[in-house]
Image: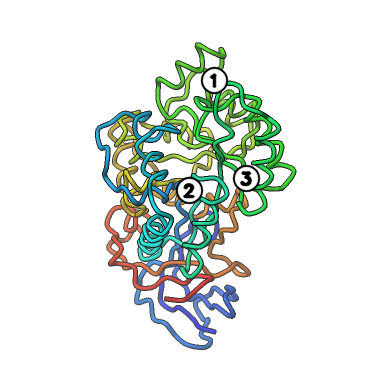
Amino acid sequence: MFTVTNGIILRGLNLNPIKANIVVDDGIITDISQDAHEGRIIDADSAIICPSFLNGHTHIGDSIIKDEGYGLSLGEMVKPPNGVKHRALASAEDEDIIEAMKDTMWDMVKSGTTHFIDYREGGINGVKLLRQASKDIPITPIILGRDDSFYGDDPDLSEVRKAVRKLLKIADGIAPSGFGEITDEVANLIVEECKKAGKISSIHVAESESTQIDSLAKFDRTEIERGVHSSFNQLVHCTNPKNNDLDLIKSSNANVVVCPRANATLNVGIAPLNEMLKMGFKPILGTDNVMLNSPNMFRELEFTLKLMSITYKNYLNPCELLKMSTTNACHFNFDKSYIEIGQIAEFNVIESFSKNPHLSIINRSETKNILCTINRNINQ
């Protein structure tokens, strides 16, 4: 048992700042009050106690080719099966992929991330490699698998179903690349099997303007329409919504993950976060491919704050933005906790630089400013 004292706690799902002490017993928060003093005392000295980060979208397998292919198009970089990423993964040794993923996970741990949702290429072996790589690292991977049988204009649906069921035995869900590579029949099959297994179905949609135009031309529906109609749990990017796309998402049960730095790197657009928040969305923030970006959520937060203000001529609420990397995930059953009595203790203690704790973290904090991370796996 220990008590973190004298901190500014960002409490609850809404990250309400309060001056209080927080007691942790056997990994569970048992008290939050100004008078609490039990067990070992850790003096936070007016630092900010914030829920640990969840990185909502990564591809850490491509850690083996950091910064390669810069300046190429989206398709040239990441479209299966011949994108720069896929060619590199196909030619790499398993041991090299594992070591690169380990390095990336340690980078995440050091920068306050305790959970990440990964789109894992390579079928069953790809999922196993990430499980092996994460085994002794204090981080929780949420692994979404895929298989090459998904792709093509006329896939064998019986083979797709077999592949999906095998993947779901070891993965947390399924995540095909996008509607440019799979048919609606494959999409519906994936969602159906994930629903039966109680697992996540996720897909990239509307990442670029061109994929939206292609989808409209071929199917008279946007990629977002196709994602919503297929009932995917999670829609990643939504950078270029058209028509009534956002209304469709709002009326569905899907969560949205946005990746502003990756979209900027690939020159594909800027997600309309201001509008999403105005409509009541609870987006999640991700850093996307490690070949494009570091998985550091501090960098993603600051970039997003400033990009949105200059793009939409309207300031983004910093508390709402910080929720995108912390508590918004709690609404979607990703096994992520928040700071409240009875919750698993998973939080960062971060030096404070201003009277606004949300902006202090987003605008001024770096990895070196994390005084400690309390994690279900290990206390650092």
Query: Does 63 sit left or right of 378 as displayed?
Result: left
Residue density around tag 1, few if under 14, some if 14–19, many if 20 or more, within 10 Å: few
Front-lying residue, 192 or 25 = 192
Residue pictured at 53% horizontal, 20% vertical: 222
Query: Does 371 sit left or right of 343 as displayed?
Result: left
* Element carrying mark 1: loop
Residue denoted by label 2: 56
Vertical placement of 19 versus 108: above or below?
below
Kindly report which numbered mark, 3 or 1, lies closer to the viewer in this rendering.
3
Residue pictured at 51% horizontal, 18% vertical: 215
Q: Please give the label number shown on residue 146.
A: none
Q: Please give the label number shown on residue 244.
A: 1
Residue denoted by label 3: 200
Query: Does 169 sit left or right of 361 as displayed?
Result: right
| Residue 259, percent from left and from top | 40, 40
Is residue 267 at least partly visible in the picture?
yes
* Element carrying mark 2: strand
Total of numbered circles in the picture? 3
Which residue type does callout 2 highlight? Answer: Gly
